[in-house]
Amino acid sequence: MSAAFATYEKSGRVVVITLNRPDSRNAIASHEDCATLVELLRRADDDSEVSVAILTGSGTAFCAGGDLKAMKERRGIGPLATPADTRTNYKRGVHSHPARSWCSAIAGKSLRPSIRWSR
């Protein structure tokens, strides 16, 4: 994949993290995509100059979730060697979030949105 999965732009005290794979509706296709997103979220959280962080997606969708094609072909973020490994990886990525408040700029529909606040 040629373009980075997500971009990080800081202007003054505002950071915008943009999921950057509009052709797949910004689906998370790989473990690297997940790691990139967590890294950028933590980068913003660790920056004491950041007051506002916005998470958004390029194109017509915010994020389709996991890339089902990649999961089906066993090259995506789907099952790992054991169920325990899969659970650990899921929690590391999906349940990982910074301590600060976030704003999401969502284009289009948002089906069954949920936020889990645990640290």
Image (tube, grey):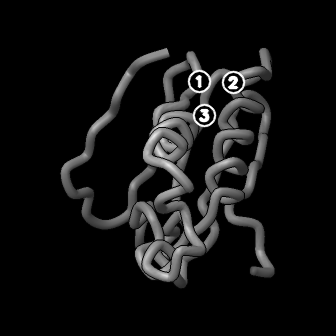
Within 10 Å of disc 2 (Cα), the crowding (few <14, some 14-19, many 20+) is many
Query: Is the Cβ of the residue at disc 1 closer than 8 Å to that at disc 3?
Result: yes
The kind of residue tagged 3 is: Ala
Query: Tag 1, which secondary structure?
Result: loop
Residue at (39%, 66%) from the top-left corner?
A: 64
- Give the Cα separation between the discs numbered 2 and 3: 8 Å
Q: How many marks?
A: 3
User: Badge 2 is on which residue?
Assistant: 45
Return the x and y of residue 46 as percentages of the image width and height.
76, 21
Query: Is the Cβ of the residue at disc 2 closer than 8 Å to that at disc 3?
Result: yes
Residue at (42%, 18%) from the top-left corner?
A: 118
Within 10 Å of disc 3 (Cα), the crowding (few <14, some 14-19, many 20+) is many
Residue at (77%, 75%) from the top-left corner?
A: 3
Left or right of residue 70, residue 118 in this image: left
**Image vertical order of residue 84 relative to residue 36, above or below:** above
Left or right of residue 30, residue 7 in this image: right
The numbered mark at residue 98 is 1
The kind of residue tagged 2 is: Asp
The numbered mark at residue 83 is none
Which mark is nearer the camera, 1 or 3? 1
Residue in the foreground of this view, choosing between 59 and 19? 19
- Give the Cα separation between the discs numbered 1 and 3: 11 Å
